[in-house]
Each structure stands twice: as structure tokens, then as C-alpha cells.
Image (cartoon, rainbow, N blue to C red):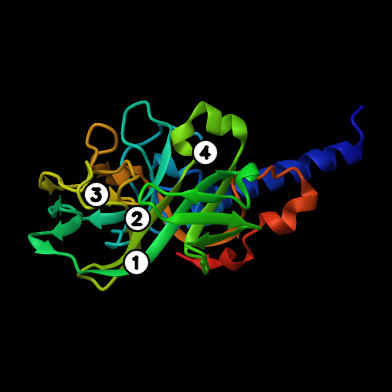
Amino acid sequence: MIKKETIEFVRSLTTAIFLALLVRSFLAEPFHIPSGSMIPTLEVGDHLFVSKYSYGYSKYSFPLSPNLFNGRFFASEPRRGDVIVFRKPGKDSKMDFIKRLIGLPGDKIQMKQGRLWLNGKKIPKEYTGEYILAHVERSWEGETLSTPTNQLVRVSEDSVFLNGEQLDKNYTLDYRTSAQCQTAPSSCQVVVLNKYRETLPNGKSYEVVEVIDHGPLDNTEVFTVPEGHYFMMGDNRDMSEDSRVQNVVGFVPRENLIGRAEFIFYSHNHYRPFIQFWVWPELMRFERFFKGI
């Protein structure tokens, strides 16, 4: 005979799971950032909440994406400049991406010499400084490293110094293991990026970074966004697979939108071992907690 306490426990657990699924499906879902494609807006190791109700609901709004219906219900249009989580287009894709919405249905998008053109007009772009992307081993701490552009960078006690001057948070610092650097040496390096502020026609303003103005994604064809689709781009313009890469992402169907990124609730250095609780204070980036997106 099953004890009354066991029945109550199972009932409470089932209720808690059901309520958690409701919140995750209809209100908000947490996501984490595993890559640097949205630097400087989002850094590796950021954890954020995405509002599921912002654009209505599709099958991708729910756990396991059950193929019960097509399209969206309670749908509303996203705004240009929103940072959006979406399911990567493709019949068998199970990957969620996060990018910024640049093009609405009918828009014409083009990159020319690193400048964004929208419907035949060049988007204003103002230089705001340098940004350091540092993927380094812990063993490199204290050493002075040379970047591809011959600038000197030193990492010391979770701070970054450029040409002898300490940077004030204008960097992403990710510690990697020696095994990661040996497996993919090109992924362990320090790069100086140029940071700019773009302002879209609706007034939405945000920062982007890039290395050069003549990379493979800096000069493109004119993309005309089809009806029912959107054009997405990463804020890290030279290091983002987005709608500019038509055979990988391409235009994103309205149905694939999952939700709008709202705010960062937690952030830590992605390449530190999280299970080592004694380094948690060092691991956390408190200045990014509850930061709006």
C-alpha cells in the first residue's frame, strides 16, 4: 500500500513540474550564451530571460517543439532592433540562435565595406572605441601577448591591459583550458576589435564590433526579405553566422521566433569550472547582473 506521504510528494512534484512547464512555455524561458556572435551586447557566459509572449506562440515555444500545429497564435510583429531567440531554419534543426532583427518583410539589406544599408540608405555608424576579445589560458596570466595588429595585451587578475593601460570593461575575457587551445589553436588568441554605435531608422541604437571592413561578410549582395520572414544579424559582425550566410541561416520564418531577450539575470566566466564553489565570487560578473538588453 502506498503511503499517504508518498502520494502527496508525487502530487506536489507533478504540480511543480506542470507549473514550471507553463511558465517556460507561455511567460519566460532562461537561455545562456555559449558563443561570442553577439558581443558586445551579450558575452559568453551570460544567462538571460526571454519573454515567450512577445510575438505570440508557435510549436517552437514549447518543450521538444511538438509538431501539433503550424504558424503562430496571438501573434504580434517584432520591432526592428529587437534581440531575438529563434530556431535555426531547416527541417531537422534543433539549434536555437540569438541575433538582432535588422530586416522586416519587404526590406532590402546589404553590407558594403562594413556598412549596413537598409532600403537604399546607409545606417549611421559612429566609432566608439576599441574592444578586446581575449580567449586565453590561465597559464598566460601576467604575460604580455601581441595581437595580429601588433598591439600589446596583458591579462592579470581578471583584468585586461592594452598597451599598458587597464581597460574599463571594454573586453570579453574567457579562460580556456590548455586542451582546448591545443585542439583549436586559432580559438585561443587576443583580438582588438573596433566598436561602433549603429542607429536604425526607428531610433533603436546599439553597439557592434568588427575587425575589418573588407571581410567575407562585409560586402554582400542585396537581400530582399520575403513575406513572413526576417533578416537577423549578430552584433559581432565579422564573427557571426546569420542571415548573411544564406546556406546556414538565411531568412528566418516568422514561425521560428521563440521570444525576445529581455535582461541578463546572471553572468559568469564561461571557461572557469563552475563546480568549484570556492571560486564563485571570482567567477561571477556582478556588473552584468540584471542588465537590460
| Residue 268 image offset from top left, x and y in percent | 62, 53
Which residue is at 62% across, 61% downward? 285
Q: Quadrant of residue 166?
A: bottom right
Tell me the tag on residue 63: 4
Could you say which quadrant of the image residue 271 lies in? top right
Q: Are marks 2 and 1 in contact (CB under 8 Å)?
A: yes
Circle 4 or circle 2, nearest the eye: 2
Question: Label 1 neighbourhood size at 10 Å, few (<14), some (14-19), many (20+)?
Answer: some
What amino acid does circle 1 point to? Tyr
| Secondary structure beneath label 2 | loop
Report which residue position mark 1 lands on: 206
At a point 65% along the width and 42% down the height, the residue shown is 139
Of the numbered discs 1 and 3, the one sitting upstream in the chain is 1
Q: Which residue is mark 2?
A: 235
Task: Point out the image quarter for the N terminus.
Answer: top right
The answer to which of 143 and 114 lies nearer the viewer is 143
Tell me the amino acid under the disc marked 2: Asp
Q: CA distance from mark 4 to mark 1?
A: 31 Å
The residue under label 3 is 230
Q: Residue 126, percent across and down? A: 26, 70
